[in-house]
Image: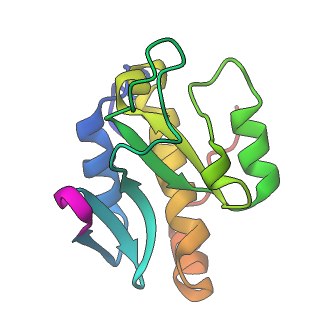
Amino acid sequence: MTVDADRPARVEDVHDLAMAMPHVTVDHGTGDNPVYQVGQKSFIFFRNPRPDAVDPETGERYQDVIVFWVASEDDKQALVQDEATPYFTTPHFYGHRSVLLRASRIGELTLRELAELVQDAWLSRASKRRAQQWLKDHPPAQPS
């Protein structure tokens, strides 16, 4: 993690953090949006505007939705139900182990929080062997 891990996160950080994870490839979906994959399984993707993610005041489709996989439905609910976070979901993603984040709100996260989200997304989709190796090489920091 960089020295300034508490600075506001940026969209560029999503790309940098995703590519820093091992065995990552980038595919490009509709609209040439990046889809980050591990073992041919997406773990982060930039979504095209869809009718299920709209501004409640204007009805305009969000142009900047990023999808992050999570480990479980419980993890998803913990993120989307916490009003202090910018995460959300839509009916299209009910039952899908992922959370949505608008790029325009990414600065509400610190770089450290975004790094954890990206790592958790990768871990949720990596093979068991790759995930175990990564966790062995990157033990969680112990509180002081």
- Asked if one can make out residue 67 in the rendered structure from this viewpoint, the answer is yes
Q: Is residue 39 above or below residue 2?
A: below
Give the residue furthest to the top: 57
Give the residue furthest to the left: 32
Q: Is residue 9 above or below residue 89?
A: above
| Quarter assignment of residue 27 | bottom left
| Quarter assignment of residue 95 | bottom right
In magenta segment, residue 31: yes
Residue 88, x across and y down, in percent: 61, 35
Residue drawn at point x = 26 percent, y = 50 percent: 15
Relative to residue 103, is residue 26 drawn left or right?
left
**Viewer-closest of 34 and 120:** 34
| Image quadrant where one finds the N terminus | top left
Residue drawn at point x = 53 percent, y = 59 percent: 121
Residue 107, x across and y down, in percent: 39, 21
Relative to residue 86, is residue 71 drawn left or right?
right
| Quarter assignment of residue 94 | bottom right
**Viewer-closest of 131 and 35:** 35
Q: Is residue 91 above or below residue 133?
A: above
- Asked if one can make out residue 143 in the rendered structure from this viewpoint, the answer is no
Relative to residue 85, is residue 5 drawn left or right?
left
**Viewer-closest of 45 and 92:** 92
Give the number of marks.
0
Residue drawn at point x = 40 percent, y = 40 percent: 65
Residue 96, x across and y down, in percent: 66, 61
Main secondary structure type of the part rendered in magenta: helix
Give the residue furthest to the right: 74
In magenta segment, residue 46: no
Q: Which residues are magenta?
A: 28-32
